Every structure is written in C-alpha cells, then in structure tokens.
Image (tube, coloured by chain):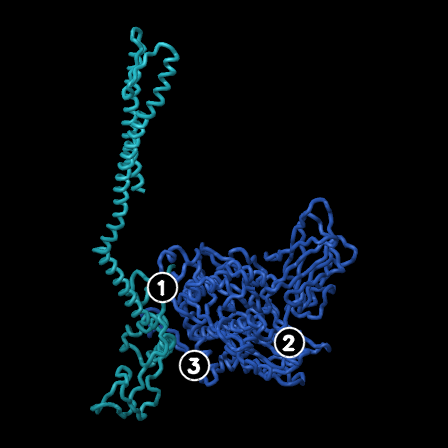
Amino acid sequence: MKEGRYIVGIDLGTTNCVVAYSDMQVERAPREMAKINLFRVPQLTGPGVVELRDSLPSFLYVKEGHEDASNSLELPWQEEDTVTVAGEFARERGAEVPHKLISSAKSWLCNSAVDRETPILPWDTTKDIEKLSPVQASCALLRHIKNAWNHEMAADDTDLCLENQAIYLTVPASFDAVARELTVKSAQMAGLKDIVLIEEPQSAFYAWIDKAGDDWRDQVEKGDLVLVCDIGGGTSDFSLIEVNEGEDSLLNLERVAVGNHLLVGGDNLDLTLSYFLAAKLREKKKKLDAWQMRGLVHSCRKAKENLFSSEGADEYPVTVLGRGSSLIKGTIKLSLKLADVQQVVLDGFFPACSLDDKPAGSSATGMKEFGLSYESDPAITRHLAQFISSHTDDQGNPRLPTAVVFNGGVMKSPLIRERVLDVLKQWHSAAGSGEIRQINAVDFDLSVAWGASYYGQAARGEGIKIRGGLGMSYYMTIEAAMPAIPGLAMPTRALCIAPFGMEDGSQAESKDRLFNLVVGEKVTFDIMSSPNRPDDQLGDVIDNWEDMGITGLTSIETELEGTDEGFIPVTFEVKVTEIGTLEFWACSRDDDRKWRLELNVRPKV
Amino acid sequence: MNATKAYATKSFTVIVLFMLIIGGAVSAGIFFGLKKLALIFAPGSAGIITIPGINETFTIQTLADLVHFLEIATTQYIAYIGIFTVLVFLVLGLILWVLLKSSVGSLLKTLASMPADKKGRERGEGAKKKDFAEKRLEQERQKRLFLHFISVLQREGRLLDFFAEELSGYDDDQIGAAVRSIQEDCKKSVDKYLSLVPVIDKEEGDTVDVEPGFDPNAITLTGNVSGEPPFTGVLRHRGWKAAKNEVPKLSDVQDASIVAPAEVEVE
C-alpha cells in the first residue's frame, strides 16, 4: 500500500459515488485520528457547465460524433479518448435519451448471467452506438474521479495524484469473489493500481466510530450484535457485527454475517410511487408521455421526502407541468396522501412480517426478461428476516441483533427507519428476547466513503479494525464416490476450500485431498459459494449441496505447462489477498511448482 | 524548412562556382605544364628546363639528371612555390568561407527577422486584434455567467416559461397549481447556488441599532434620517445575503446568449 499524503475512501455506489479523504500530514495530537474531508467532485451539470457536487451520480452518457465536436461536453482536464460523460449531466441528459444511458454499472458487475467483459451497456439498445462492458463502465466512473482529483488536488505536484495515494474502494458485502476481482480490474484499468477493497456496511460502521470518537465504547457493550442496514438507491445490503471483549479487556468488533445482494433500493420506491399515481391519472383518462412521467418521478421523490420527514403534512401536492409553452394549461395536479405513501412504500417495501417469512420466489410468469435480476419480492423486511433467521447460535435459534445502524439514502426518512425498527422489535418480542436500539448514523449518503477513509487510518494502526475476513465460504465440486451409472449424470459433492471468516492475507490448503491434473490440457473446476454456512471447515464435504444453501458461482481454470509427465498430483490452495480478492492455486505435491487458476468471468452455459 | 532549402541552393551554387574556378585553374596549369614538357622533350630540343622562381637550368639527358631535377624540384619547389600555392588555396578557402558566411548569415538574419516581424505585427495591429478577441471572449463569458443563473431557474423550475404565460386566460386554481411546483424548484436552485441568509437576523418589527461606520450597501436607511449615526429604527426588511457563492466553470460555447435550448424530438 502506498504511503501517500492522503488516505482516500471511494464509495463506488450503484447510483452515487462519493469520495472522502484524510490528510495525514496535518498536525494533530498523538493518537488522534486525522480529520476526514469530503472531496467535492467537479462534473458536468449542464452543457458546458462544470460544478462541484458532493457526489458523482454513477451514470454514464455515451457521446456521439456530433456531441464530441462541440465543446459543451468538455471537462476542464484532458480526457484520454473516452466515449462517455459521467455525473449529474449524464443522469439528466440520459433520462431524455435512455438508449444512451448506462446506469447501475455496479449491479451489472455482479450479474453472472452476462459476460462482464464484453461491451453490452447500454443494455437493450438497438441503436448503433459505442458500448461498454460493465468493467469498462466502472472504470469510466473511477477514471472521472481520478482525473477530477488530479485536477483539483494535484495541479502542481504529481506526488498528490490519486494514483499515488492509499485508496480504499468500497464494495457491497455481498460481492462474491468474481465481482471483487472485476472491481479491482476496473480500478486498475482506470490507472488506480494500488487499492484495497472494504465492505460497505463495515465502512458505514467505521464512519459511526469516527463520529462518536472515543465514546463509541460507551455506546455498545460486550455481547452486542449490531445490524448494519444499508439501503441505497439501487441495492440493499445487510451485515451483522458482533461486539466482543478481547483479552486486554478492550472491546473488539467482528463482522459475523453478510447478506445476499439485493437489487432493490430507493429508486424502486420512487418509481413505484409514480406508477401508483400514473395509474390514478389513467382512471381520470389522463395519459402521461415519457417526458411527463419523468417529471412525475421527480415530483414524487420530493413529495415522498416531504411526507416522510418528521413534521410532514398529511397530504402533499404533486404537480407535473405542461410541456413547452402550455405550461399552465398542461399542468396536471394531484395530491399524494400520507396514507397512500404508507400503503405503497411502507407496506410494499417494508411490510410487517414475522422472522419465519421468506421472500416470495420468482413470479410464475415463466419468461423473465433477461437483464439485471431485480428482486421479484420487493419487501426488504422479508429479505431481512431471511438474513437474520439464517444466522443462528449454537442451539440453532436465530440470533437477533441488539442494535441497528441505518445507512443509505432511503434511511433518511424517519418513518422508514421507524418501521424497520418496529419490525425488528416485533421479532424480539415474539422471541421473548431483549431490546433493540438504534445507533445514530452520521450521514446516510456520505458515511460509506467516510468510513473507508477511517479504515485506511485504522489499517495504519491508528484506530480500531473490525475483524471480518471472508464474507462467504467457497466450495469446489468433486465427484461422488459411487459407480457410474450409464445415462445418468454423476451426482457431485461440494468440498469446502475456503471457510467463512478466513482472514485477509491468509491461505488455506486442502492438504489431505489430492487431485491428478493432466499436463498440457486445460483443467476446469466449478466453484460454489454460500453466504450462510459459517460453520463449514476447510476440507468438509457436503452432499446434495444444491439443497444446502450453496449456489454455483463460476469456474476456475488453468493450463499446466510441461510435456510428458502425464499426471501431476496437486493440492488446492486458496489465498485471501490483502486487497480483499481471492486467489486459487494448484500446488504440486512432489515439488514446489504452483499454478494460478483464473476465475472465469464469462457466463455459465 | 524553407530556410534550409534556400541555404542549400545558395551554398550549392557558390561551391559549384568555386569548384569550377579551382578546377579551371588546375586544369589550365596542367595544360600549360604538359605543353611545356612536350616542348622540352620534343626531338631536337636541348632538353633544357628552366623553372620559374628557381634560378637554375637543367639539361636532362640521362636518368640521373632526371633524379637530380626531381630532388631540386621537390626541395626548392616546396620551399617556394609549394608555400605560394598553399597560400593561394588558403586565400581561396578564406574567400569561400567569407562568402558562405555572409550568405548563411543573411539567411539566418531573414529567419530571425521573420518571427520578429510577426511579433512586431502582433504588437502592432495583431496585439490589438488579440486584445479585442480576448475582450470579446471575456464579455461572452461574463454574459454567459450572468445568464447562467437564469438558465438554471428555467431548467430546474421553468421560470421563463411561466413569465411568458398570459395569466388572464387561466383560473387562479390552475395558476396556483403550476406556481407551487415552480416556486419549489426555483427555491431549491436559489438555495443550492446562493443559500440566502438575512443581512440582519432579527424579526421584522424589532428595534435595531445602526452603529457608526455601518456599511451603507448592507443597510438602507429610510424615513426620518438626519445627522450622524448611531441611529435607532425599526427593521422593515431583513435583507438577503448570499452565504455561498460558488461560481461554476463554464466552457466557451458558440452562442452565449442561449438561455434555454430549443428541444427537437427525433422521431
């Protein structure tokens, strides 16, 4: 890791990117943490207008020839022939021409149904425009951040360039090994060679620690189980952090569980509200065109924020102005009632449910449109129930969290926070266990980047670190030991090759299991993962793994060089790198040769 | 590029001329020498060689005579005529050098004078032109910056479209519905760009003291004003002050007078 002047935390979000940094050269008292600042990102906010914003909307607008020629899309710095514009202008302009807009690049990065390194975005475009791969799209966002930083912070000193600083990039806790690998790859493509990955919910928790200062030890106690509930614009992410007492009788923190990747977030709320209102308009025989629909989504967001703020009214007017010169004549006026919002948002996305409830499976419509796999059940509380009930204690009872930290734009609304807290309390009372309290978050939008910068300081030994390690356990298929039956596929078994909680920088070798690999031929192994089997140990073999919460991830492959040796007996070794990615190695038993097995990022056939 | 070409042609002609002269001189010398030798060795001649500059006369009849002649010629000739010829070539070389130098020098001078001329021109009428262009550009930028805030209000809140409406044709209800949205969006933009705060943070109607040395830009005194401060009066308007003034960076566009672009939907 570079020992640059700044420690930079980058929250590469699904809908917004935020950058925070701490200046390590500023004078401060010993043992005091360096102050963390927000880097305001310069970006195009209109044609020919460059302004600073707290965040960079994660939207890319694909330029075309006639736009490239005019200088209205120029940035104050030199761009190495990029075909996209990032930020606020991209989001606004892209809403007008959706076939040229790339959004949710990060969700595509963890979509194993597509080849994430072929240019497929903008998705669903029939027009002949330049396309980017999900990796390239993430790279374009990071490149914008890098260039913006170098323009603002390192105008006359290359030592201050972003690529020369310690960079901590946040990823959802639910990102699997492939998505992490691709995130690192996109950062490297953007010229950020030296980065470390950190999980977003952990990062949000670090932000709280930083804000609370030394008092944080008074606000949690030994035995606390803290739920981090991060609901952003496009995704939801849960983690459980356990508070323990170490041998030195100081509190320490350990991340004990991470949830699945859920493609549901604040944008879904706004869209649902606006479709709800559009349906009401249709009853009145008023139809909205695409332009007015955008206006409606926009006003719905305002109305929702207003109604959900603590001193909101019971009703809020939603107006969609007429287009062009028929401003007043074409104005459509509606009013959004608090009861409606509660019904649509709270009961739709945060319904009261019991801990045993499971999210509804995919709908029975048969053909599902290919693309991002949005959740078929939007009820976030049901996903939360599934997450918490899968994390059990020794007796097999679900361990209920005793405190909760909220994060993400959706959680800005006190009503939604209250609802989630109510649901959690209800689970507690049903189980007859203790209380749950809310830990005050710092800033629902910015704290992830903030916490990443704190973590960077902690990594230099200046603050507390959450012990975490691998957020999932990883498996490899092996064939069952039974005689082959003609015409039947051999049942496979899952061999645990990397257990949950493996520490960064450690490695695990499955010593007692040998594989004979053929020299000079491509060898492929299927890799599976599971987020909720923390008790599996290295070398454990699981039968019927499909029914045991283990899902196929991808394959790893390599080609063993060599000529006439025939077979080489090898063992497998899995390494968790300091960056936060996984490496798979095949080690020869008889000598010290090693082969790296590459993760396959192409979709499974 | 042009200068080197000019230099090449010029030096080429000069060198060719010199080579022609030297070649001519040498060939003429060989011609006359051969003619003389032919006379000496012609049958019937006495074989007497008289070398100009050496007061000796040879009569070549045997080989030994020839060797002797060569000996005398090499020592004496080099001593006198050799030095003379070397001097002549030196002088020729000098002349060549001077010529080349002068021609190259004049070329370099023209080269040097070319940008100087340009500079001079710029400093003259060019400078005026540039200053003028820069001034124009600056004016355009100022104009764009001035219009930018209006264009933000139009983009975010449709303010100009609202101003353009003929209100007499609509009910107050209809106007009210539209205004609600416009006011809200415009307010958001004003907050974002200026974040206005009152100049005097007190309630209207409160009694206010105006100290000596107050900023007349910040406080306007009305009513019964006479004499010197301090004054005491009633706050009628709290005033507005921009707490934030973040000027965006605007790139140069073709037409700075555009406030809101026309929209054309491509079918």
Say which residue label 3 marks: A316
Q: CA distance from mark 1 to mark 3?
A: 35 Å
Question: Which circle, 1 or 3, is nearer the viewer?
Answer: 1
**Label 3: how many residues lie within 10 Å, few (<14), some (14-19) or many (20+)?**
some
> Sequence-wise, which precedes: disc 1 or disc 2?
1
Q: CA distance from mark 1 to mark 2?
A: 49 Å
Separation (CA) of disc 3 from disc 2: 36 Å
Q: Nearer the viewer, residue B79 or A579?
A: B79
Mark 2 lies on residue: A388
Three-letter amino acid code of the residue under disc 2: Ile
Amino acid found under the numbered disc labelled 3? Tyr
**Circle 3 SS class:** strand
Instruction: Quadrant for the C terminus of chain B, please.
Output: bottom left
B118 relative to A120 in the view: left or right: left
Q: Which residue is mark 1?
A: A48
Q: Which chain is blue?
A: A
Q: Which mark is residue B178?
A: none
Instruction: Specify whether residue A556 is in view.
Output: yes
